[in-house]
Each structure stands twice: as structure tokens, then as C-alpha cells.
Amino acid sequence: MKNSQRAGSQDDRAGTAWMRRWSGEKLSVRLLLVAFVLVLTGALAWDGWFASASQNATWTPVLVSIAVVGAVASGRRRSWMSRSR
């Protein structure tokens, strides 16, 4: 195989790094991530549409904090995984 062919195949794979990361994770990790996102989305929808003003004032900062912590933890885990390879 020529170097130019190898370089082309690496370029093809470079755009799918997120897919390899997603498919490389354990099923339990993927299911936990999907469940976390669905529950958080449902809670934010309830907070925005159905909660009273006092509930909204209480739960909005809590739910946003949980979302931020989850995003930061996910980002750190992914960056740690990429460094360990």
C-alpha cells in the first residue's frame, strides 16, 4: 500500500472519530448516558411547562447545575479516554 493510499484512509477515519468513540464504549455506559439525557430533558420540560413559579425558581438552577456537571464529567471522561490510547 502506498503512503498516499494510507493517508487517504486516515482522512476518511478522522471524520468518524466520535462514532468510533461511541461504538467503542460499553453498552452499559451508552445506556446510562441515554437515560441521563432523557431524564434530564423530561425534568427540564416539566420545569418549563408544568411547574409553578415557586417550583420553577427552585428547580431550574438545580437542573441546570446537574446538566453542567454531567457535561463536564462526560467531557473529562472522553478526554481521558483519548489520552490513554
Image (spheres, rainbow, N blue to C red):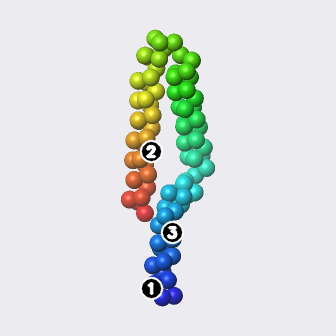
33 or 28: which is nearer to us? 33
- Quadrant for the C terminus in the image: bottom left
- Residue pushed farthest bottom? 2
In x, y percent, where is residue 83? 38, 59
Residue 42 image label:
none
Relative vertical location of residue 43 with respect to residue 10 in this rendering, above or below: above
Q: Is 45 left, or right, of 59 in this rendering?
A: right
**Where 18 sits versus 77, above or below?**
below
The residue at 55%/32% (across/down) is: 41
Q: Amino acid at mark 2?
A: Ser
Q: List x then y, in percent, for residue 73.
A: 42, 42
Q: Residue furthest front?
A: 49
Q: Amino acid at mark 3?
A: Arg
Q: Which residue is pictured at 51% across the width and 12% down the height?
A: 52
- Check disc 2 and report the residue beneath it: 74
Q: Residues within 10 Å of mark 1 (few under 14, many from 20)?
A: few
Query: Of marks 3 and 2, which one's residue comes earlier in the chain?
Result: 3
Reading the chain from its start, which is encountered first: label 1 or label 2? 1
Task: Determine which residue is flagged by label 3.
Answer: 13
Question: Residue 65 appears at what percent x and percent y?
Answer: 41, 29
Task: Mark 3 vs mark 2: give the one in front.
Answer: 3
Q: Secondary structure at mark 2?
A: helix
Q: Residues within 10 Å of mark 2 (few under 14, many from 20)?
A: few
Amino acid marked by disc 1: Asn
